[in-house]
Amino acid sequence: MLQVSYVSRSNEPMSAERLLQLLLQCRENNAAIGVTGMLLYANQTFLQVIEGEDEVVNGLIDTILQDPRNAQVPLLSRTPTQSRQYADWTMGFEEVTDAALKDVAGLKNFAASNFN
């Protein structure tokens, strides 16, 4: 099993409707191929973690890297794992906002505008 995290930059801002469409598509696609993970979004920037069988995750990462909607996609980690960290989420989602960050210990000087 493999867990991969990466950051991607959208070529254009995402409306709430487009984010919802993307999330629903991710959840449907991931459920079909046995992938779990989480997705954060702010300032045209996504932080995503996906996990599943090695071949499936590698194939999905290849697809993401070739997606023309992304301007940049640096991989942060590629880690073999024995168990899923997000086993209950076909794709957990959170939009990063100042309100969401306010109560996170250690992020007192971090705002949503810093998420990029």
Image: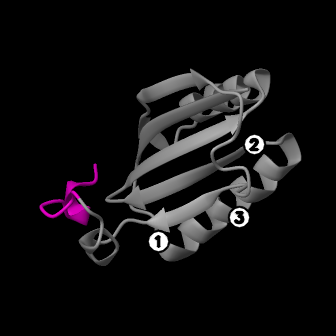
In this rendered view, identify the residue nearer to me: 7 or 68.
7
- Check residue 108 for magenta coloring: yes
Measured in 3D between alpha carbons, the distance from the residue under mark 1 to the one under mark 3, in whole angstroms, is 14 Å
* Residue 55 image point, x, y percent: 77, 21
- Check residue 48 for magenta coloring: no
Secondary structure of the residue carrying tag 1 is loop
Q: How dense is the environment of label 1, judged by Cα within 10 Å: few (below 14), some, or many (20 and up)?
A: few
Q: In this view, does 71 lie to the left or right of 16?
A: left
* Residue 78 image point, x, y percent: 54, 23
Q: Farthest residue in the bottom direction?
A: 99
The amino acid beneath tag 1 is: Ser
* Residue 73 image point, x, y percent: 44, 32
Q: What stretch is highlighted in magenta?
A: 106-116
* Label ID, residue 15: 1
Q: Name the residue under label 3.
A: 24
Tell me what residue is drawn at x 70 percent, y 29 percent.
57
Q: Name the residue under label 2.
A: 35
Single out the mark in the foreground, 1 or 3: 3
